[in-house]
Image: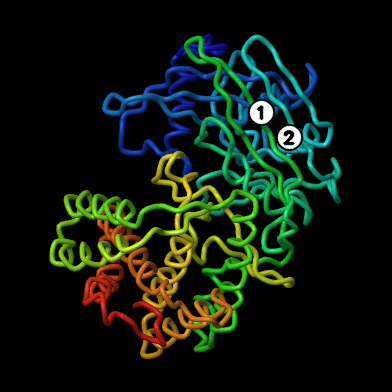
Amino acid sequence: MSGPLDGLGDEAVTSLMAAVGGARWFAGKGRQPTPRSLTALPWLNEEGAEPRVRLAVLEVAYPDFPGTEHYQLALAQRHGPGPEGLAPLYTDGDATVYDAAQDPEAAAVLLQALLEQRSVSDDDGAVRFHLRERGALSPDLPARVFRGQQSNTSVMFGDVAMIKLFRRLELGRNLDIEVHAALNDAGTADVAGLFGWTEATWSSDGVVLGADLGMCVEKLADAVDGWDLALEVLRAGGTFADHAAALGRALAEIHAALRTAFGTSERPGADVAATMAGRLRAATAVAPALEPYAAGLQERFATLGEAALPVQRVHGDFHLGQTLHTPSGWKIIDFEGEPAKGIAERVAPDAAWRDVAGMLRSFDYAAASVPGPGAAAWRDACREAFLDGYTGGAGLGDGAGPLAAYEADKAVYEVVYEVRNRPDWVGIPLGALTALAGPTTEHTTHEGAPR
């Protein structure tokens, strides 16, 4: 293992890689990760502090994969006992190293560094903290690690703020930070406030690399996950239509702000159709269950070739789990895009129908998760209300065809995901494709809403 921590022994490296390999956020499960380097960035607090805290970048390679992946580690070095119940990452001489994101005292150092806008550097790299808005932040806010399943790690600070540490790093600017900043500047009320962020630079094989490491956002008081709320309402036999309409209005406001902040352009519909057709061919190779739908889906995608599509910056991975219901209304979170896509694809402008289709598919999944005689009617009511809210009651008009194509594209992606991860669920997207692969001229229900 090369890099500033090349003094780690084999036992420490093995222990560290075991901890990383078992983490929810590690993307290399089932493969053979080889650590190339662990670059420890400068200490964030003074010598003699207990714990002493630093951030680090782990570079991992795979024998069957070109290039490398970069993961952020938050390291808390202690010479005395660590937090009760927290397993160490490894031992280094007379010190024990823990995950700082799981250690409340160590996490508090990250907040303090942001409040002081620290900028630290040494021969191995640099870390810079940027404070946009102090708000109610204070160094004495108690830290609490969020224990839910996440692709990143979130630490709550009282009822005021949340620091999200990005684990699998994307070189360059993080989309979530960029979009939150733009939407905050636009005065959009449908997202959390951005207090600040952290960035770093380091060297790998003589090349200077850089990435955003984390962001500090407003903690939304009394927030309820949109997916959980939808299932709760459905199980109770209630209507979610009013919530769905409000979500449609919130998404429309987000899209309008993104158009203003990042601009718009056009993309030939034929190019979009060709991309979707290519994804379908690749998906069918993985999931042969798609074969009976292929011809109809190709026809569905081909309808996009009739005109240019307006495109803009979008959320990219919009569904009920990316929303929070608060006393002040719905908030939209996680603007990093679909995790399976590369950064270039996620930042590229796309039709706003991408996000609309994502929420329609989410309603379908919610209904399928609570099967019963009223589930289909609940789903259809949500769809109709959401579309009505999004369009401001104006209807889809010429958007019905493009929306159906985007919904079909999303369902194709879902089939592959379910085949690989939850085979018992593959019937949900296949059921949608039964309708979406049907005749392209009569494929509507609910006053023009595509099904």
Q: Quadrant of residue 246?
A: bottom right
| Three-letter residue code for mark 2 | Leu
Q: Which mark is residue 76?
A: 1
Residue beneath the point at 21% across and 62% down: 298
| Front in this rendered view, residue 156 or 176 | 176
Numbered disc in front, either 2 or 1: 2
SS category of the residue bearing label 2: helix
- Residue 2, position in %: x, y? 47, 11
| Front in this rendered view, residue 292 or 260 | 260
Marks 2/1: CA–CA distance: 11 Å
| Front in this rendered view, residue 388 or 64 | 388
- Residue 204, position in %: x, y? 50, 15
State which tag comes first along the sequence, 2 or 1: 1
SS category of the residue bearing label 1: strand
Residue beneath the point at 66% across and 50% down: 180
Residue beneath the point at 60% across and 13% down: 93
| Front in this rendered view, residue 173 or 15 | 173
Residue that label 2 marks: 110
Residue 306 drawn above or below residue 88: below
| Three-letter residue code for mark 1 | Ala
Residue beneath the point at 80% across and 31% down: 117
Crowdedness near tag 2: few (<14), some (14–19) or many (≥20) residues, C-alpha within 10 Å: many
